[in-house]
Amino acid sequence: MPTCSSGHDSATDDYCDVCGTPLAAPDEPAPPRVCGSCGTPQVGRFCEECGHDSLDTATAAPAPPTPAAWHAVVTADRDYFERVVAAGGPDSAAMEFPLYCPERRFVLHDDRISIGRRSRSRGIFPDIDLIGPPEDPGVSASHAMLVRTAGAWAVVDLDSTNGTTVNGATNPLPPNAPRPLSDGDRVHLGAWTTLTIRLA
């Protein structure tokens, strides 16, 4: 029964069936062993330099990849607001751009993310709740939805009252038709609200 350089008795004669060390033929020297963790020469099971166990394969396994994290960054967009007012929509003359509207960030944590304004009386609690303050009067309770599609996202207008546009377009999206989005695309809804889709 052959014995490997670490002193294990092996049932096979090519590689040690205990630690995997190649077994040398009688007339050729065994190849040098190195630590799988730090790369220094190794004689026994444990590395004398870092203590790595040559039988522990878990430490050598690569870490699983971190899934991509997508966010929606919500802001009050003055340029979009001025386009809405210039288009002369209903009540646009009476609307005022908010004096202060903090940026909000929402993690896109599910395959479907609803966008709108919370309505307890109607039982509507959107994932991206734009109730405010300040409250954008042009956002519907169930305004739009973000849908995950093959590692990216699409936006769907849910037949909202005032429509949804993307990247400054003048024509609103057709209701219930997914429009693909890329990192950095801007979704406009209501009187001044813009959601920027970001891959973190």
Image (spheres, rainbow, N blue to C red):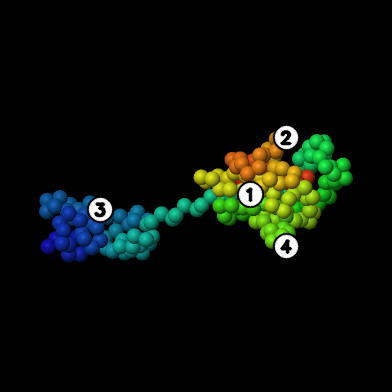
Q: Residue at x 79, y 53 (%)?
A: 135
Q: Position of residue 57 (x, y in %)?
A: 34, 60
Can you tell which of label 2 and label 4 is closer to the viewer? 4
Looking at the image, residue 92 sits to the left or right of residue 19; the answer is: right
- The disc labelled 2 sits on which kind of residue? Thr
Residue 78 position by quadrant: top right
Among the two numbered marks 2 and 1 on one chain, the one whose residue lies closer to the N terminus: 1
Can you tell which of label 1 and label 3 is closer to the viewer? 1
On the image, numbered disc 4 is attached to which residue?
120
Can you tell which of label 4 and label 1 is closer to the viewer? 4
Q: Residues within 10 Å of mark 4 (few under 14, many from 20)?
A: few
Number of the label disc, if any, that sits on residue 170: 2
Q: Residues within 10 Å of mark 3 (few under 14, many from 20)?
A: few
- The disc labelled 3 sits on which kind of residue? Pro
- The disc labelled 1 sits on which kind of residue? Met
Residue placed farthest to the right in the image? 94
Can you tell which of label 3 and label 2 is closer to the viewer? 2
- The front one of 137 and 34 is 137
Q: Look at the image and tell me whether residue 104 can be seen.
A: no
Q: Is label 1 in a helix, a strand or a loop?
A: strand
- How far apart are the alpha carbons under marks 3 and 4? 71 Å
Image vertical order of residue 100 relative to residue 120, above or below: above
Q: Is label 4 in a helix, a strand or a loop?
A: loop
- The disc labelled 4 sits on which kind of residue? Arg
Looking at the image, residue 55 sits to the left or right of residue 59; the answer is: left
